[in-house]
């Protein structure tokens, strides 16, 4: 069962630096996604009886004097899917070129690229800033006859768009088994020839190097694995990264420079979420 726990964490005091840092600590403890706001953040993790304790332990050595009020709520997989479809996942148009919708949507706008996504709790519908930013960067690329590796593919949406944009070989990698199966379903649903691998960045060493590497994950994972992304990238190849805030960019670029990667383009949302386009020299 694809059950999750939603952990609401109110922070006193609260600001963007605090919620960013709290998300980083929680990510290290295995939490998968985060929704920051003016009072704190909501974090999501696979359901476990130890979730609230794990959150408290992750924040126990927080370097700033902050009071954390933690409350855990169980989310049943099927109920979450229905709630997501009903209240959150609406058809959207990206860059006036790509429409993303689900199978239950009616009156879908016409667009050059039509992507069908039934999320089932896997990350990546185009609604989150990081996903839509990555899609905007992809739409600006010339992917004709190019090879692409998408690390942490989630729903598979970036891989599907890359294939629709003309990429000849697309390989998607996903560590979460449920998301991996969901991505396979989406490649079939969108009639796209994409290889989906169940694993993490360690899988890159067994693949042919690519012209493009995508990673829409989070700051900590990117910093940990960017050397592997770079090794998997052809010379003059390009890397698209997102899943972090603009104040994380200096840290990421310092690490990227060690592997010959330099910034070509940057997108920043009003909330501060950032996507980078880097080139390997």
Image (cartoon, rainbow, N blue to C red):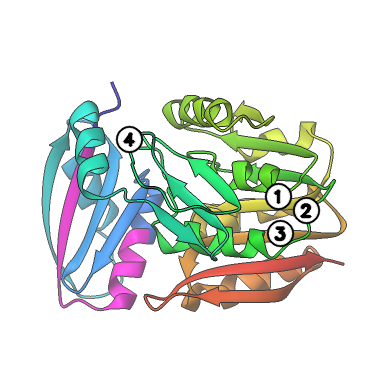
Q: CA distance from mark 4 to mark 2?
A: 30 Å
Which quadrant of the view contains residue 97?
bottom right
Q: Whole-percent x and y of residue 203?
A: 69, 33
* Residue neighbourhood size for the residue with mark 3, other residues' Cα within 10 Å, grouped as few (<14), some (14–19), many (≥20): many
Q: CA distance from mark 1 to mark 3?
A: 16 Å
Q: Whole-percent x and y of residue 27?
A: 39, 51
Which residue, given by chain and number where applicable, does mark 1 sit on?
Answer: 165
Mark 4 or mark 2, earlier in chain: 4
Q: Nearer the viewer, mark 1 or mark 3?
A: 1
Q: Nearer the viewer, mark 3 or mark 4?
A: 4
Above or below — where is 246 with respect to 141?
Answer: below
Image: magenta residue range: 5-23
Q: Which mark is residue 239?
A: 3
Q: CA distance from mark 3 to mark 4?
A: 34 Å
Left or right for 11, reference 153: left
Above or below — where is 211 with respect to 246?
Answer: above
Q: CA distance from mark 1 to mark 2?
A: 6 Å
> Which residue is drawn at the image coordinates 55% and 41% (left, top)?
153
Mark 2 or mark 3, earlier in chain: 2
Mark 1 or mark 2, earlier in chain: 2
> Which residue is drawn at the image coordinates 52% and 43% (left, top)?
115
Residue 20 painted magenta: yes
Q: Secondary structure at mark 2?
A: loop
Q: CA distance from mark 1 to mark 4?
A: 25 Å
Which residue, given by chain and number where applicable, does mark 2 sit on?
Answer: 143
């Amino acid at each position: 069962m694809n059950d999750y726990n939603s952990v609401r964490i109110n922070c006193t005091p609260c600001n963007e630096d605090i919620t960013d840092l709290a998300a980083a600590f929680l990510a290290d403890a295995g939490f998968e996604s985060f929704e920051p706001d003016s009072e704190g953040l909501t974090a999501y993790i696979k359901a476990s009886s130890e979730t609230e304790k794990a959150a408290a332990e992750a924040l126990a050595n927080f370097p700033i004097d902050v009071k954390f009020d933690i409350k855990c709520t169980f989310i049943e997989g099927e109920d979450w899917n229905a709630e997501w479809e009903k209240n959150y996942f609406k058809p959207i148009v990206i860059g006036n070129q790509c429409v993303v919708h689900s199978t239950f949507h009616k009156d879908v706008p016409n667009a050059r690229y039509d992507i069908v996504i039934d999320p089932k709790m896997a990350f990546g519908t185009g609604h989150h800033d990081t996903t839509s930013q990555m899609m905007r960067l992809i739409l600006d690329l010339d992917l004709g006859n190019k090879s692409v590796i998408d690390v942490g593919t989630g729903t598979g949406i970036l891989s599907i768009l890359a294939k629709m944009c003309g990429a000849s070989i697309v390989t998607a990698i996903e560590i979460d088994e449920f998301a991996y199966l969901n991505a396979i379903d989406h490649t079939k649903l969108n009639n796209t020839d994409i290889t989906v691998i169940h694993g993490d960045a360690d899988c890159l060493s067994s693949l042919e190097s690519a012209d493009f590497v995508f990673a829409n994950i989070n700051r900590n994972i990117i910093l940990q694995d960017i050397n592997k992304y770079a090794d998997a990238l052809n010379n003059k190849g390009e890397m698209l990264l997102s899943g972090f805030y603009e104040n994380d960019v200096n840290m990421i670029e310092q690490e990227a420079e060690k592997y010959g990667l330099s910034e070509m383009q940057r997108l920043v949302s009003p909330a501060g979420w950032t996507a980078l386009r880097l080139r390997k020299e």
